[in-house]
Image (cartoon, coloured by chain):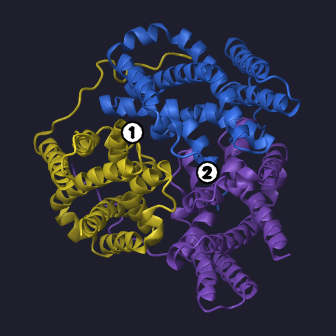
Chain colours: A yellow, B purple, C blue
Amino acid sequence: MTHMLLLVLDLIGTFVFALSGAVTGVRRKLDLFGVLVLSFAAGNAGGITRDLLIGATPPAAIADWRYLGVSVLAGMVTFYRYSNIQRWRNPVQMSDAAGLALFAVAGAQKALAHGLNPVMAALLGMLSGVGGGILRDVLVTQIPTVLRADLYAVAALAGAAVVVLGEQFHVPLVATTLTGAALCFGLRFMAIRHGWHLPVSRHSGMEDPPV
Amino acid sequence: MTHMLLLVLDLIGTFVFALSGAVTGVRRKLDLFGVLVLSFAAGNAGGITRDLLIGATPPAAIADWRYLGVSVLAGMVTFYRYSNIQRWRNPVQMSDAAGLALFAVAGAQKALAHGLNPVMAALLGMLSGVGGGILRDVLVTQIPTVLRADLYAVAALAGAAVVVLGEQFHVPLVATTLTGAALCFGLRFMAIRHGWHLPVSRHSGMEDPPV
Amino acid sequence: MTHMLLLVLDLIGTFVFALSGAVTGVRRKLDLFGVLVLSFAAGNAGGITRDLLIGATPPAAIADWRYLGVSVLAGMVTFYRYSNIQRWRNPVQMSDAAGLALFAVAGAQKALAHGLNPVMAALLGMLSGVGGGILRDVLVTQIPTVLRADLYAVAALAGAAVVVLGEQFHVPLVATTLTGAALCFGLRFMAIRHGWHLPVSRHSGMEDPPV
């Protein structure tokens, strides 16, 4: 039951992330296949990387065709209905925050289940949430926006940390999952609304000295 | 016997793909080592990624020194005989199509042998064929051309799909291998000759709205 | 004892490599999180890739929180004390050479311990040393400097090769480790001091023919 719920939410998260990849692909003038590749990469790279790192092969996104299915669906919708997607942009941003929240908590749980130490489990939860966006941007040769976006990865880390801490203190899983997801979504929401962001070193962009 | 044949063809495919990596490296003014790295990456990244995803570690390209050998050979030839390679450019394009065809069918067979579901087996076959070119381009900070090239990845997917379908209907392996490879090569050949390509969304390149 | 020593040196290597990632992040105006990610990537990507390729999951850098600890420490120091780091630049270059030397020999030993053939063990040792810098540069969309730097990867390969050859001829491990590390450090030191580098193909940068 809980497992079923997690799978459904996981697939929803994959779908919204895949949308972000597909939009990027269309903007970069990729052909239909290229758009589908970016959809799959954005929606699944985070989870695949996590599964490879914890030794859970083949990764769920490879072994279970449904992850591919929702990724392709998102790519097709974007490719043929791009203007509608554009109209939704803000809703997409919101659902993307929801996907991030869910991937973070689910990723942390999976890492804990594989016996990783708490600190790395939280980081792998974060990685599950942000990995897809990183690969998407590297493939189109952009510096991953997640490295600069307002509290994007930090929100994912906070959500994953709640799950990990809860597990340490034997808090029921459902409670920590909901709390962690809500915290992540809330932080991301506030960051989008109010432009919250992390400090940048006052030395940033200093000239590269001759080497 | 069949296994021996596959290995030989696999190494030939590695060689021709490695040539494409080496040519890219020379054009980007990489030193000898950089050229050899791109040769190995282009020739083996697809197969290595496939093996990691299906849990076959260490990957064949790492465990068997012959994959390294042919990659280095391709890099050396290109580095010291670049002008000859240039003269062959079209033959190389043809043999590259042959390598793509072979990697696609061999990759799909390996994935099926590891018990993956048919859909993912076909995609992993495609990935074996295109992965090397993707890493090659990312390393020199280009948007992977395979995402835009005329029917490149689609040809690989078609070839891999034939192998997977044949396996479902218990068609002899040799028959599906030859048919799949021929289909992939044929599609790629026609795409090069006649510029066949996939549609691009009519919204492509639309301005990125302020976020 | 030897194991303890290797761990300490390994963590020192991770720290100095993480510094290089953090400096890159600050220069590219990444926020605090982005800087920490580049620190971790530069300090650990090489070892993680090696562990994935030899099937040692979860990788040490993921299973052992100390690798994360020193990476974050390096990132924090750089972010808040950038000017001091700049003043050290040359010492950092020297310690980076030391980290490269150590990762190369330790990586080769780990690969041999996992039963890889000698040639691939030497290459995986080299990969452990250079992998971090490659990911660091790809994330900020630069062509990996290691592919062009003066004898950087070649020095790592030489150090790793000493360990592998020593193992073939049953030379005591401590002796080969020290010799290999010294050779790698020495080559890198001379390359920095005297600009030693590998040849570049005289055809480099030739125009890309119309395809």
Does the rendering let one see residue B11?
yes
Q: Is residue C56 above or below residue C39?
A: below
Q: Position of residue B194 (x, y in %)?
A: 62, 78
Give B2 or B40, whichever is nearer the viewer: B2
Q: Amino acid at mark 1?
A: Asn
Quadrant housing residue B94: bottom right
Secondary element at tag 1: loop
Q: Position of residue A16 (x, y in %)?
A: 27, 63
Residue at 43%, 12% in the rendered image:
C85
Whether label 1 touches label 2, CB < 8 Å = no
Q: Chain of mark 2?
A: B
Residue B136 numbered tag: 2
Give B16 or A59, whichever is nearer the viewer: A59
Nearer the observer: mark 1 or 2; the answer is: 1
Does the rendering let one see residue B195?
no
Q: Amino acid at mark 2?
A: Arg
Residue C117 numbered tag: none
Give A42 or A115, whichever is nearer the viewer: A115
Residue A117 numbered tag: 1
Label 2 Cα neighbours within 10 Å, binned few <14 / some 14-19 / many ≥20: many
